[in-house]
Amino acid sequence: MGDETALTVDGDISGSNSRSHVLDVYPLNCYYFGSKQALSLNDETIADRVDRMKSNYAAHGLRTCVEAVILVELFKHPHVLLLQIRNCVFKLPGGRLRPGESEIDGLKRKLERKLSIGEEGSGLDWEVGECLGMWWRPDFETLLYPYLPPNVKKPKECIKLFLVKLPASRRFTVPKNFKLLAVPLCQIHEDHKTYGPIISGVPQLLSKFSFNIIEP
Amino acid sequence: MGDETALTVDGDISGSNSRSHVLDVYPLNCYYFGSKQALSLNDETIADRVDRMKSNYAAHGLRTCVEAVILVELFKHPHVLLLQIRNCVFKLPGGRLRPGESEIDGLKRKLERKLSIGEEGSGLDWEVGECLGMWWRPDFETLLYPYLPPNVKKPKECIKLFLVKLPASRRFTVPKNFKLLAVPLCQIHEDHKTYGPIISGVPQLLSKFSFNIIEP
């Protein structure tokens, strides 16, 4: 770590006039992992999904999803925690808000459900930090954009990414039908094909931070 | 703007528990544009440039560049101000810090030189905001990454992007050999080929903001 500490000073990251951000990251081996009963998944076709989004939109308006960017350290490089479903799809932990639910409460509820022992309210808390970015879906079947495209007055979905800071230790309990993976920033950067536009852009969204890797 | 105002509420952006950011953006026609004497440019080959970077690195260590993300509104969509050089290369306004110079002072100096009347110290000030992202060049001839790649102990260059907020009106004075362009977010998003990795990623770096477009 000697060289990297020197680098921080060279780069003026710790300088008094710097407007950069420092983020503490703990090694993967600070955390414990267990499994719990499988979560039921929607086994629907794309057409079913579009129909469900349309009827939900008619009832509740804009769909808002909240997702967590959670980091651990491995091989002196930050890794993002991703859930893998059915050995193919990668997702940031999170999900859809209930009507009227706040973003923070909704994200904590989803993290409880997907990463903690209890279904809800197990007592462990999650430190939800700043919003890192937002993606918009202008129509039910279209692509996502990191801005509201011109002339789109009524987008159908907004996906908001929040930084979630881990404590120095914690236990993760993951449903049996999900895999929890720690994937290095250098692997997901610009790999749209494997990870999709949102996850493959996470390294950029984190690029303003300098990482303070804490050895146990 | 009626629908967009409603959208802000739907999206919970203005909600009390939101951690999103609101950014005021003024229309392009709030600003005045003039020209001034051409700036001398380095007419060097790539090999010359690598040699210059190497000797500068030997003398001063890590090269730090600071660049400004400046927004205006046109057709109800945010546009980024880019400088175009020789009808081909697009750049964010900014440049290299002098040894020992602070990031904020250096960026203000570069903005004076490239976008204001005086060479330096014309009196107009620039509101340099938060750091949006950083890109690293591990070696003199290699690609840029939005993180420090694993095992890179001595990167050669760090490019830091700062949000620069415009006042409700101002005059820009641009060297005759540069063109100042306002390019819509939807045009630069993911267009690596035209704009390079840094500029084409700016829409993502701005995606956490909701834009408050101020009509004059």
Image (tube, coloured by chain):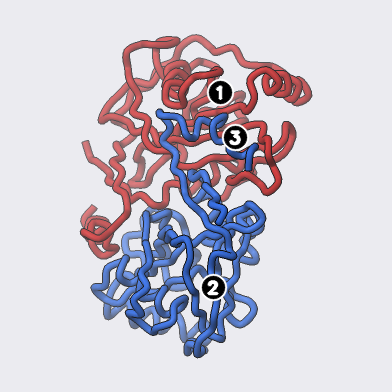
Chain colours: A blue, B red
Residue B182 falls in which quadrant of the image? top left
> Which of the numbered marks, if any, corresponds to residue B96?
1
Please state which of residues B37 and A122 is positioned toward the viewer in this rendering: A122
Q: Quadrant of the C terminus of chain A?
A: bottom right
Q: Secondary structure at mark 3?
A: helix
Q: How far apart are labels 3 and 1 at the CA level?
A: 17 Å
Which numbered mark, 2 or 1, is in the foreground of this view? 2
**Residue A139: x and y, percent?**
42, 68
Left or right of residue B10: residue A23: right
Check the residue under mark 1 and report the chain it is in: B
Give the residue type at disc 2.
Tyr
Give the residue type at disc 1.
Arg
Q: Quadrant of the N terminus of chain A?
A: top right
Determine whether A185 is above or below A138 in the image: above
Residue linked to disc 3: A7
**Residue B47: x and y, percent?**
78, 24
Q: How far apart are labels 2 and 1 at the CA level?
A: 45 Å
Q: Secondary structure at mark 2?
A: strand
Left or right of residue A64: residue A45: right
**Residue A72: x and y, percent?**
55, 60
